Image (spheres, rainbow, N blue to C red):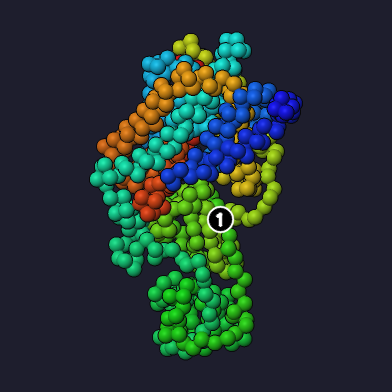
Amino acid sequence: MWQSIVDTVRAYPQIIIFLAIAIGYYIGKIKIFGFNLGSTAGVLIAALVLGQINVSISPLLKAVAFALFIFTIGYKVGPQFFSGMKKDGIKYLWISLFVGTVALLLAIALGKFFGFGKGLTAGLLGGALTQSAVIGTAEGAIKHLSISNVAKATMESNVAIAYAITYIFGTAGLVVFYKLIPKIMKIDLKKEARKLEEELSGSTDAEEGPEFFNWDKRLNLRVFKVTNINAAGKTVHELEALFPGKAVVDKLKRGNELIDSNGNTVIQTGDILAIVGKRAAIVEAERIIGQEIEDKDAEHVIGEIINICVLKKDAVGKTLGDISKDYGHGCFLRRITRQGHELPLAKNVVVHKCDVLKVAGAKKDVEKLIGHIGYPERPTVTTDLIMIGVGCVLGTLIGLMSVKIAGIPLTLGVGGGVLISGLIFGWLRAVHPTFGQIPSGAQWVFTDLGLNLFIACVGLIAGPKALNALHTTGGAIFFAGIILTLVPHIMGIIFGRVVLKLNPVLLFGALTGAGTVTAALNALKEEADSTAPAIGYTVCYAFGNVILTIWGAIIVSIM
């Protein structure tokens, strides 16, 4: 019976691949003391266990899955990566370089001290810094080594095994670290986050605090007739300024004619005004304007809710307050996200290229805003597979290049080359948004499924050698992983506080980005009771993905 199952699985290896993914995703969701491993660690553990059956896995499947994953990662962070090299993002570049360099040097030192070798050291770095892409770039570099195929296979297995041993503390350890470190440093993270939000909102007044710019999700449309003598004779802008909150004149009807008004249009007695705003402002409308009435012409407003990707030069680098003032008449902001992470809705938050603003309002006002700040992300299921195909081809060719420095051949490997290609195409997409569309759903498939399909293949291949490696070096690898996880972050805190003098909320967020540990960022947001740490996280996350991914090939080349 058992032998029949084994024979079937070996004849159809896709069975065990899908089984590893299914079991791994289930394991990744299990919460222990409020913490879960995540899909990547779960899939790798499941694959290492199932790999004891010793199933032959096609290296082509593994290569294609990794290429789709790493290209899409580059595509997603490309705009943030290149824009982060400008003046406003340079401090975050320094943090990422500092943490990455400390991690590389420490990994090499630990590898030499414990005698791990190339494969174990690369896996140690990947797991301790939770950068799964290191596995792919390390394996790519291993293929260039002048050693036997058996030695290469052993080295590739060691990468996966060391990664699996160190990944758990690399994630869970940092979650605990960032919950404890503010207390150890006697920093009140909630207080610091509130202070930062007050700075970003431009006020310490409770009524003008961080929430004053948070335009309400539920908008009201009401119609009023101008009977108040104090309203007649004022311009539209002057009337709107009388409301205790954001409210706008969306339509103006004079007699039987709808007038195409603007901020300078003078209001007359008897005009009919359609006012859009949140309830707190609308309730004052009768006092300010006059009697509420019904008018089908004025009430007929076509609304729109849409995500706008900020791309225009005139908008990038401006604050939310400036964008609202200059272009946002009639538009109500629901959310701002950067690389999928929500930022505080405060008027002094600086907008970066490819930030996404979720905006609601009358369609004509929203369309005007789109024209001023960027490109609408309208729902679509179409993916530009031409760009993905060309990008992966060019990236592979870049990765095959090898350069000798001090007699040592250095190569990015296929993974590093495809990552560079993804960065470039992601940046080009930001510059010319009419091509290269990868919808968010497709991005998830390529990154999450692509990575875990690759990880499943890696674990199944490494499985037969896993038990022996765990028995001989498992303890030393785990101990080295703890050191490699914590030391770069401790050194980063010292560097950020002493040299860069960063606000602790931004610094801690930046360090979780430099280490590409999203779980630690989420822990920080909980401790701070604020989304402010995400401001520091995003640019460093873009740099960290590139730097740490390339380190996988560098370690194999110089160890």
**Image coordinates for residue 27, horizontal then vertical, percent:** 55, 40
Q: Is residue 470 left or right of residue 46?
A: left
Most foreground residue, 11 or 84 = 11
Q: Is residue 431 left or right of residue 485?
A: right
Location of the N terminus (image quadrant): top right
Q: Residue at x 31, y 62 (%)?
A: 203
Q: How many numbered marks have been drawn onto this rendered protein structure?
A: 1
Q: Residue at x 63, y 56 (%)?
A: 378
Q: Label 1: state its secondary structure.
A: strand
Crowding at dot 1, Cα within 10 Å, few <14 / some 14-19 / many 20+, comes out as many
Q: Is residue 261 left or right of residue 318?
A: right
Q: Which residue, as the protein is rendered here, is positioned at the far front?
A: 1
**Image coordinates for residue 229, horizontal then vertical, percent:** 42, 88
Q: Is residue 51 above or below residue 147?
A: below
Give the residue type at disc 1. Answer: Ile
Q: Is residue 119 visible?
A: no
**Image coordinates for residue 465, horizontal then vertical, percent:** 56, 19
Q: Which residue, as the protein is rendered here, is positioned at the far left?
A: 186
